[in-house]
């Protein structure tokens, strides 16, 4: 019996896994540098929320079109293009920062550009997973590894970014991120596909195709319920990181190092949760994981609101990270298994829209709430909302069965 995860037996997935791992560390470094730079330039909680909003709103507006493009295009080539564009965006931030010409308008513009890239890249990446693995049985392993990869980078990236910001400044964070894209681009270029990924036959115009995918997803109780719960998760849990500069500086009286290690704590929780999910061999009980995970992450936010010392904040953010990764892997796995292949891109685009496209509204909401009622009250409000949603979800899917097997 081998300890190597099943998905890593596929050469193409190996190339993607290791290249993407390096790139994602750079991405998390840039995310930390961006929120830090925004707060240094403006000192505004509302502006932190707005920048988070503007960077993700393209996913909400154009995510379904991105899923349709992923279905109708060569996903391998499309990912190479999106990664090159993302690399150029990071280098643009680096040039402006190092030349001293960076301002909030430039950050907003480039954040919006990155959001447009992500609107195509995210559903393409989700759909491309199945193209890379050699055995359909390895799909659960690949989904779990993808999520764990993101959160390993989330562990390393913020901690590294905090040190880089303190020692060198935010500009060098963007430089490192730009070069990190070369790893995933190189991995994609080295991939070989004996048979080109099958494209769907184009029978409907784009708007009709998107409507067909929407109707399919929301007419099926498990997929509809998971998507709705992911919307709650994205609205209430995901935007917490945009408030962390305020929490680190004003509540904990810390600096960039403090911010980096707080976000790294969430990454540790996510890493452990990801390892657990990779070890699962069946979809049985995933509905319990989904509701439990939202309960855990919501509780973590509520507890964070009452902490005033670093180690307690570190522990509560561990819970947020642990619950968040369980939520995302369990939801993604369930949708990937249940969805029909000819609608995979469109349904997964709804998933990525729910994850990435709704969170900007959460960033904006958190920014407004934090300005008028404070960070602590905002965290408590978000946590309570998640607890109620988790209980409702658990009750709704309690007796649902698929082909005689409880999900």
Image (cartoon, rainbow, N blue to C red):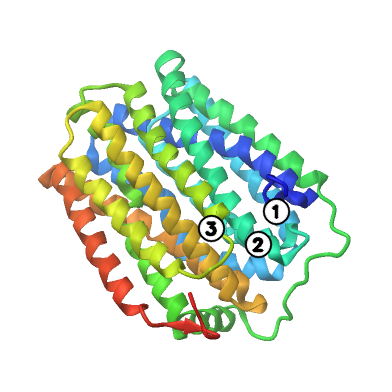
Side (left or right) of 184 relative to 403 = right
Q: Is label 3 in a helix, a strand or a loop?
A: helix
Q: Earlier in the sequence, mark 3 or mark 2?
A: 3
| Pointer 3 with pointer 2, Cβ within 8 A | no
Q: Is residue 58 visible?
A: no
Label disc, if present, on residue 285 of the rendered structure: none
Q: Earlier in the sequence, mark 3 or mark 1?
A: 1
Of residues 223 and 52, the one nearer the viewer is 223
Residue found at x 47% / y 43%: 272
Residue for badge 3: 119
Q: Classify residue 314 by image quadrant.
A: top left
Residue found at x 30% / y 31%: 39
Residue count near mark 1 (Cα–Cα under 10 Å), binned few <14, some 14–19, many ≥20: many
Q: Residue furthest top?
A: 167
Residue found at x 55% / y 78%: 210
C-alpha gap between disc 3 and disc 1: 26 Å
Side (left or right) of 87 relative to 80 = left
Q: Classify residue 282 by image quadrant.
A: bottom right
Q: Is residue 20 visible?
A: yes
């Amino acid at each position: 019996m081998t300890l190597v995860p099943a998905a890593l037996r596929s050469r193409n997935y190996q190339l993607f896994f290791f290249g993407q791992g390096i790139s994602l560390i750079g991405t998390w470094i840039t995310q930390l540098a961006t929120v830090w730079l925004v707060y240094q330039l403006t000192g505004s909680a509302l502006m932190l929320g707005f920048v988070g909003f503007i960077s993700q709103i393209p996913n909400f507006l154009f995510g379904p079109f991105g899923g349709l493009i992923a279905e109708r295009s060569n996903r391998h080539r499309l990912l190479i293009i999106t990664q090159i564009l993302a690399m150029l965006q990071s280098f643009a931030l680096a040039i402006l920062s190092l030349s001293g010409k960076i301002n909030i308008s430039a950050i907003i513009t480039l954040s919006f550009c990155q959001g447009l890239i992500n609107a195509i890249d995210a559903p393409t990446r989700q759909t491309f997973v199945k193209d890379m693995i050699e055995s359909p049985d390895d799909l659960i392993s690949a989904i779990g590894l993808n999520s764990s990869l993101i959160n390993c980078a989330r562990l390393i990236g913020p901690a590294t970014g905090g040190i880089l910001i303190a020692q060198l400044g935010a500009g060098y964070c963007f430089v490192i991120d730009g070069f990190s894209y070369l790893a995933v681009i190189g991995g994609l270029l080295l991939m070989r596909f004996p048979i080109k990924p099958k494209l769907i036959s184009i029978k409907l115009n784009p708007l009709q195709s998107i409507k067909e995918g929407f109707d399919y997803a929301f007419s099926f109780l498990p997929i509809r319920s998971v998507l709705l719960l992911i919307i709650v998760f994205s609205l209430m849990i995901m935007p917490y990181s945009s408030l962390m500069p305020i929490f680190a500086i004003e509540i904990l009286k810390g600096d960039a190092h403090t911010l980096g290690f707080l976000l790294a704590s969430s990454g540790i929780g996510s890493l452990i949760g990801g390892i657990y999910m990779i070890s699962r061999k069946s979809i049985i009980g995933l509905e319990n994981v989904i509701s439990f995970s939202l309960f855990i992450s919501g509780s973590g936010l509520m507890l964070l609101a009452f902490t005033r010392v670093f180690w307690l904040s570190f522990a509560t953010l561990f819970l947020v990270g642990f619950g968040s990764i369980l939520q995302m892997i369990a939801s993604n796995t369930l949708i990937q298994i249940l969805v029909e292949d000819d609608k995979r891109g469109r349904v997964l685009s709804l998933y990525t829209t729910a994850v990435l496209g709704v969170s900007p509204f959460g960033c904006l909401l958190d920014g407004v709430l934090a300005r008028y009622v404070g960070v602590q009250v905002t965290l408590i409000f978000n946590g309570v909302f998640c607890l109620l949603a988790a209980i409702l979800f658990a009750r709704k899917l309690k007796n649902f069965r698929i082909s005689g097997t409880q999900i």
